[in-house]
Amino acid sequence: MTMEDLIAAARVSKAWPFEEARKLLKRYPDGKPGNVPVLFETGYGPSGLPHIGTFQEVLRTTLVRRAYEAMIGARPEDGKTRLVAFSDDMDGLRKVPDNIANKAVLEANLGKPLTRIPDPFGTHRSFAHHNNARLVAFLDQFGFEYEFVSSSDQYNSGAFDDALRQVLRQNQAILDIMLPTLREERRKTYSPVLPVSPSSGVVLQVPVEVVDAEAGIVRFTDADGTVVEQSALGGMSKLQWKVDWAMRWYALGVDYEMCGKDLTDSVTQSGRIVQALGGRKPEGLIYELFLDANGEKISKSKGNGLTIEQWLTYGSQESLGFYIFPNPKSAKQLHAGVIPRAVDDYWQFRAALPTQALDKQLGNPAWHLLRANGGFDAAEAPGAGEQLPVTYGLLLNLVGVLGADASREQVWSYLGNYIPDADPARHPELDVLVGTALAYNRDFVAPTLSKRAPAANEAAALSALDQWLASASPDTSAEDLQTQVYEIGKREEFGFENLRDWFKALYQTLLGSDQGPRMGSFIALYGIANSRKLIAEALARA
């Protein structure tokens, strides 16, 4: 594949990252003026820790970034784009998080900028610095290419001062945009600018009068009743959220930023404000939020969601990216039950990649995920075209039969029946999945596992299968085993209406599950002798 081939295919691809990237191509038909990199941004509120929503927003933004690079014929190292992970750490702390042990430190500093509050964990300069460090470590864990930018650094250093002066100049225009959107009581105290109290250090929610926009001077009444006249520049103020977002777009020159559906109104108002400042609203995507297993919105207070730590306990990082990839505008249920299929589907798409035509590759989620952290030709990237020696579903069935106390060593010993070179060092990605399969079985399968007794016709069919296995060679191939399982299920004497009923009986009586793998593959993996023991146990229950 040549760069010219990629450019041509990317510009007509209907995969959603390319659809989003085309907005930027339309925005800058001849490139961004001054040959400045196109700027992508993601935002982070450091009053809490990074989570699965943080991951999906940075991942999706990265996918659009790489799609845009493909469209203009740029490689990541060419510097045609930038991704800024922006921490809103100048924000005043409004509420003490529930998961903090030393809450007294935060309670004593409510309302102050997050970077001016002591770290309750005692490891960093401030509460925000602690959480920012967690964000950076989090993003680095997944190999994202980004630049970290702190809101406090921008305010305190004066980097935002010119943009703040423009906010002061357009104070009334911003009020005209915002006041109609607020409740009557809120209008009385609303100001685009939130001054920092010189006496308490708290970010104040009080009416503010602009005294001198060019000098950056404002007037307000402090909490103690003192009328204060001071600069709004150099970290002496912060902007209201929607104004702050717009100012950031204006000051940094942000070209693309996506957000969740819950911020739809903020996008609208901030877009109008940035225009009032003389800037341009970024391109972007409003994505749907995650739902729980019952289709209800995930809530931190309810704890009804799945954390990224939980996903990585039961599945792989790549499978999480794969599950997140499809249509961002559709809500996705996020629970442990979706993980096994996501793992296997990812590997199926990854294995197919090198054999696909270029247009098909660009619609393959694995192409985008392999390119996310660099690389030109995803079809030739390390790992493209690889297949797992066993599916994750089959691995889960094996672990389920071995029981909740199964060990990694036991699993690998059984994998030796199926893989010529069954060595964790030779198959590191499979070894990761062995560990996640053991955890998934322990927490979700073993507690509910129940093998039912076979009906009379099912017992007869199982006996026939056992008799055939008794004379089969231990190294009989999975395909030959599968063929024999089919043949037994088709015999009229056993009375199965269709093969589906026969396989369901095998899953429920031998594995304790309503669904399962190709039985030929399972028997080859578990071993003929061990499989006959399963049949004997099932027949004993009849």
Image: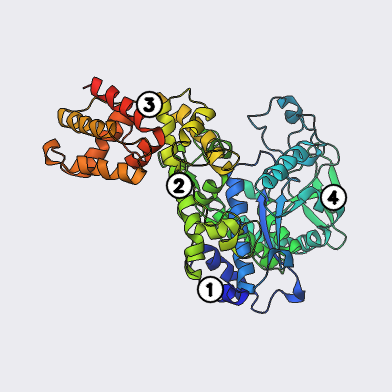
Q: Earlier in the sequence, mark 2 or mark 1?
A: 1
User: SS at mark 3?
Assistant: helix
Q: Earlier in the sequence, mark 1 or mark 4?
A: 1
Work out how far the residue at label 3 is from the one at label 4, CA to CA, in angstroms: 56 Å
Residue furthest to the bottom: 30
Q: Which amino acid type is marked by label 2?
A: Asp
Q: Which mark is residue 9?
A: 1
Q: Are marks 3 and 4 in contact (CB under 8 Å)?
A: no
Work out how far the residue at label 2 is from the one at label 1, CA to CA, in angstroms: 28 Å
Q: Which amino acid type is marked by label 1?
A: Ala
User: Which residue carries the number 3 mark?
Assistant: 448
Give the foreground label among 1 and 4. Answer: 1
Say which residue appears at 28% left-offset and 29% top-offset: 509
User: Which residue carries the number 4 mark?
Assistant: 156
Residue 57 in sight in this render: yes
410 displayed left or right of 227: left
Q: Earlier in the sequence, mark 3 or mark 4?
A: 4
